[in-house]
Amino acid sequence: MSGDALVFYSSVDNAQAWRSALIAELPDLDVRIEPDVGNPADIRYALCWTPPAGFFARFPNLQLVVNLGAGVDSLMQRDDLVPVKFARLNDPGMEAMMASYVIFAVTRYARDIPAFERATRRGEWHYIHPRPLFEIKVGVLGLGELGAAAAKALAAMGYAVWGWSRSPKEIPGVTARTGREGLERVLAESDIVVCLVPLTPQTHHLLGAAELALMPRGAKLVNVSRGALVDEAALVEALRSGHLAEATLDVFETEPLPKEHPLWSLDNVLITPHVASITVPELAARDVAESIRRVRQGLPPLHEVDPRRGY
């Protein structure tokens, strides 16, 4: 309807699929896809993934911004947003995709697959006796919706799972810790560390040279949250020295990862292009529609973000 429209922007998502999914959930919603936004004054809601600088400044009546993903750090740093309600997406499809990626990355290391991949390239029959999963300690940093789902799935498979988060959490099969001491213990006790912490000013370079040095020699790192959580120069050094044996990285401080970046040259690094989890329109549109209904009634949206915390 005129005067109650949503603008959609994403350079990687299927805009028409999102339009269809949103209208199926909320038939009266006027969905406009950038750049065809019509009268900017009509826009009340925005569903976006990393829009360009100045994008939001055109919409004087904006009330709700929903981020097309779980991490909202890019929205917190903008100067083109008036005070609005922020929400992030969280849907079963996103959780399942993230858990599947984490299970793949952790199990690839638990079953020594990189060693077999290298042996295959050498044409060598290289036997390594498998370790039972309960002997393999996995630390999951960040126990929000995505982190909790991944930790729970790993525990259900039989891994020994530690978790770390800002606030105390109770997850079946997971030994959860908090605080600086808790972080140091999880790093020191884990064979494999999975990073799913939201990026905030407090977590920028959460894993620097000192933190990476706490991990046991030969440990592995999986980062599926944000690249800036890890000091990449310190990570490269830890991987080159052999202190860290392997890393699976889906996120980077600069994306796409520059061609000259030293991570490309390391054969103990698996690089994927920020694909660990994506939003599924048919599932996530339900949450977006419900958030819009709530905002229309003067209520907070689902999965509201606290700008002071950054998540």
Image (cartoon, helix red, strand yellow):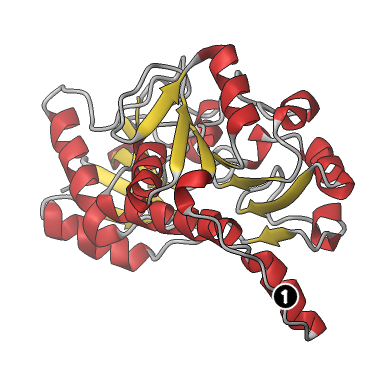
Q: Quadrant of residue 261?
A: bottom right
Q: Relative to the observer, which residue lies in front, 233 or 220?
A: 220
Give, as a three-letter code, the residue at label 1: His
Is 195 placed above or below 242 here? above
- Furthest-bottom residue in this view: 123
Residue 68 visible in rendering: no
Residue at (13, 54) in percent of width and height: 25
Q: Secondary structure at mark 1?
A: loop
**Furthest-front residue in this view:** 129
Q: Position of residue 282 (x, y in %)?
A: 23, 61
Taking the image as shown, residue 257 lies to the left or right of residue 195, namely right
Q: Which quadrant would the C terminus be assigned to in this image?
A: top left
Q: How many marks?
A: 1
Q: Residue at x 48, y 23 (%)?
A: 310
Along the viewing direction, whichever of 186 and 10 lies nearer the viewer: 186
Task: Find residue 307 and report its horizontal and vertical position in percent.
Answer: 44, 20
- Place of residue 185 in the rendered image (x, y in percent of width and height, measured from the top left): 59, 22
Q: Position of residue 33 (x, y in %)?
A: 37, 57
- Please tell me which residue is depicted at 60% across the width and 57% down the height of the picture: 109
Residue at point 68%, 66% (across, down): 114
Tell me the quarter of the picture where residue 232 sits.
top right
Q: Is residue 203 visible?
A: yes
Q: Is residue 121 above or below residue 221?
A: below
Mark 1 packing: few (<14 Cα in 10 Å), some, or many (20+)? few
Residue identifier under label 1: 126
| Residue 300 relative to residue 136: left or right | left
